[in-house]
Image (spheres, rainbow, N blue to C red):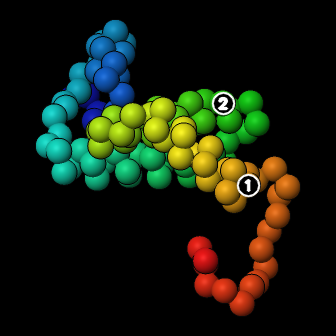
């Protein structure tokens, strides 16, 4: 009997074909809307955590995964990616970016104020 690895996570569309090319077997199912939303967000968090341990040479791979997930979330919620980019630019114009590497130790205002 073949050993099974239970992944139980959202995968990219072409992963089943990759498994087949490697003469493997698998079981998948199609997620409903609410479950898909939940799994997209879980996958985004998973990929974001992988950046923490990624070596410098592997960083581009993790960033590409996160960008793909951000685009997938935007598409799912019918938000044009250009609109996401526009909002990102507006926030950068209003609040700045992270280029100065400023670390806030304390303030007399609540977060986000």
Q: Would you say residue 7 is visible in this rendering?
A: no
Query: What residue is shown with label 2?
Result: 60
What secondary structure is found at the residue carrying circle 1? Answer: loop
Q: Nearer the viewer, residue 94 or 97?
A: 94
Residue at point 24% right, 22% down?
Answer: 25
What is the x, y in percent for residue 4? Answer: 28, 36
Q: x, y percentage for residue 106?
A: 76, 84
- State the separation of the CA atoms marked 2 and 1: 23 Å
Residue sitting farthest toward the top: 21
Residue in the picture at 67% in, 57% down: 94
Q: Residue furthest right?
A: 100
Q: Nearer the viewer, residue 78 or 3?
A: 78
Q: Residue furthest bottom?
A: 108
Q: Position of residue 26 (x, y in %)?
A: 23, 27
Mark 2 against mark 1, which lies toward the viewer? Answer: 1
At horizontal 82% and vertical 64% (from top left) the residue drawn is 102
- Location of the N terminus by quadrant is top left
The image quadrant where one finds the C terminus is bottom right
Task: Tell me, yes or no, if residue 78 can be seen here.
Answer: yes
Question: Which badge, 2 or 1, comes first in the chain's sequence?
Answer: 2
105, 93: nearer the viewer = 93
Give the labeled residue for mark 1: 96
Residue at (67%, 50%) from the top-left corner? 92
Which mark is drawn over residue 33? none
Q: Are marks 2 and 1 in contact (CB under 8 Å)?
A: no
Q: Residues within 10 Å of mark 1 (few under 14, many from 20)?
A: few
Horizontal side, residue 32 vs residue 45: left or right: left
């Amino acid at each position: 009997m073949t050993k099974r690895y239970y992944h139980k996570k959202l995968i990219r569309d072409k992963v089943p074909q990759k498994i087949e090319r490697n003469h493997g077997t698998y079981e998948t199912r199609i997620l409903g809307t609410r479950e898909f939303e939940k799994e997209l967000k879980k996958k985004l968090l998973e990929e974001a955590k992988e950046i923490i341990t990624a070596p410098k040479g592997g960083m581009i791979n993790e960033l590409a995964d996160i960008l793909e997930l951000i685009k997938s979330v935007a598409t799912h919620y019918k938000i044009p990616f250009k609109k996401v980019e526009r909002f990102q630019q507006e926030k950068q114009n209003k609040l700045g970016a992270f280029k100065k590497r400023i670390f806030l130790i304390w303030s007399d205002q609540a977060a986000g104020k």
